[in-house]
Amino acid sequence: MKKVSIIYWSCGGNIEALANTMADGAREQGAEVSVKHVADATLEDVLEADSIAFGSPAVDATKIEQEEMKPFLDQLQNYRDVNINKNCILFATYGWIEDTFMKLWKDEMSSYGFNVIGDLTIKDSPTKTQANIIKQLGKKLVN
Ligand SMILES: Cc1cc2nc3c(=O)[nH]c(=O)nc-3n(C[C@H](O)[C@H](O)[C@H](O)COP(=O)(O)O)c2cc1C
């Protein structure tokens, strides 16, 4: 059974809801799925997963959440050999400006060795169509 980890930061619940919808998609494909707020996540959650998703809101035009998510992800650059080519999906929400933060985030995770196979950026909470897209991305993590 494929092990999928979904690690996110959320304060208002938008990202948390996306994480849970993505998990539903991955479970429908038969994966063993762990969904954790980054404050509860460990390095093993990343290193032992077959594929991984990270979710964060934008906290300015160029940055994901900086107090917990960014430091957690920064440690992963030391485990490039373990994570090399591990499939990874990034999902994000923003309130008023989208700008370049997702592109920068994708480049960073690719430089840590991850194979970024998908990403989604939406304004606050998802429409039905966007919720379906995030579910499909959950399935993609398993295939
Ligand atoms: C500290 C902080 C700073 C934010 N700064 C921005 C910003 O510069 N641009 C933007 O579009 N949204 C910004 N947002 C809005 C969040 O990206 C957006 O509301 C997101 O959906 C919140 O996700 P959550 O409900 O999972 O916590 C900010 C939110 C927080 C908490």
Image (cartoon, helix red, strand yellow):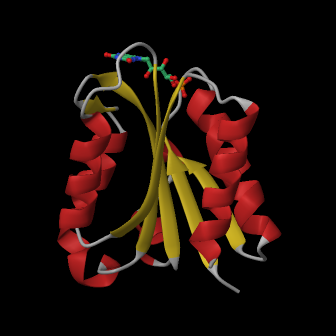
Quadrant for the C terminus in the image: bottom right
Q: Is residue 69 visible?
A: yes
Q: Where is residue 64 drawn, in percent x and y?
A: 32, 34
For the point 18% across and 70% down, the residue is 78
For the point 51% across and 52% down, the residue is 7
Q: Name the image quarter holding residue 44.
A: bottom left
Q: Tally the numbered discs.
A: 0
Q: Is residue 117 above or below residue 105?
A: below
Q: Where is residue 99 drawn, in percent x and y?
A: 27, 27
Quadrant for the N terminus in the image: bottom right
For the point 33% across and 23% down, the residue is 59
- Residue 69 shown left or right of residue 92 in the figure: left
Depth check: 75 or 122 in front?
Answer: 122
Q: Residue furthest top?
A: 96
Q: Is residue 4 above or below residue 138?
A: below
- Residue 118 shown left or right of residue 31 in the figure: left
Q: Is residue 74 above or below residue 97?
A: below
For the point 63% across and 49% down, the residue is 134
Q: Is residue 105 above or below residue 49?
A: above
Q: Where is residue 11 drawn, in percent x and y?
A: 53, 24
Q: Name the image quarter holding residue 86.
A: bottom left
Depth check: 123 or 85 in front?
Answer: 123
Q: Where is residue 82 drawn, in percent x and y?
A: 31, 82
Q: Is residue 49 visible?
A: no
Ligand 1 quarter of the rendering: top left
